[in-house]
Amino acid sequence: MCWSATADLVAGTGITAVGVVSVALAARRPRDLPLAALPLLLGAHQIIESALWRNDGGTGPATLAWAAIALPLLALWVPAGVLCAAPRAARRRLLIPLAAGAGAAAVLSYALATRTVTADIRGHTVGYALGLPRPELIVVAYLLATIGSLLVSGDRGLVLFGVLVAAGAVVCVALWRQEYISTWCAFAAVSSVLLLRWVARRRPPVRRR
């Protein structure tokens, strides 16, 4: 998981398979589908990074695809998915992380369209650079959208996932400051397998005739 092309490929394939099962289980609860599909998205994300390893980083299509998923797409996908699945009582407060995610996604999409994102292989990790202006504000909005939405979701399973992802963010910043984005995305991808259990527990019972 971000340690080599093989590790990314193996992990990505396994997490993608979990995502397929998760989506199948959520088919009878359409509001859960965006979050149920998150392991599928994050697994594919790791597979893309395995291609980036083989290309020795750089600025090619794999780098751009990886950044597009990690930055604007997840900033909007996660809070929107949480809003869809959350209890009715929590939906009003979830508009705040959704707005933060929409703002972050807009800024990051513009940056990706007008700047060049680069990937640098650094031993067993990958560093990404985009040269964002005022990155601290974007990071705050991104974390509010992704982690914040999970923590205030009002759903015990999603809160647990949020706590785990938040802890991973702290660890990744402490250990790999320059490679934080890559390592945290890998950690989040592995953690997302918890969503399979969340989906299974929310699946409505099959009615017998």
Image (tube, helix red, strand yellow):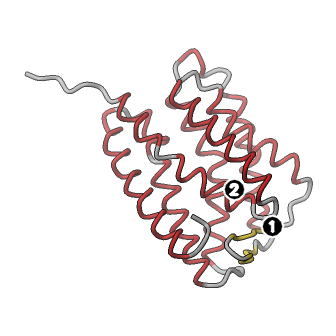
Residue under the image location 74 percent in, 37 percent down:
144
Q: Amino acid at mark 2?
A: Leu
Given residues 170 and 203, the one toward you in this image is 170
Disc 2 designates what residue?
71
Q: Which quarter shows the C terminus?
A: top left
Q: Earlier in the sequence, mark 2 or mark 1?
A: 2
- Tell me: 90 left or right of 172: left
List the residue tagged with mark 1.
Answer: 130
Figure check: 2 above or below 62: above
Pick the residue in front: 180 or 141: 180
| Residue found at the far bottom of this picture | 55
Instruction: State the image coordinates of residue 79 (x, y, percent, origin top left).
Output: 62, 37
Secondary structure beneath dot 2 equals helix
Q: Are marks 2 and 1 in contact (CB under 8 Å)?
A: yes
Image check: 43 left or right of 142? left
- Which label is found at residue 146? none
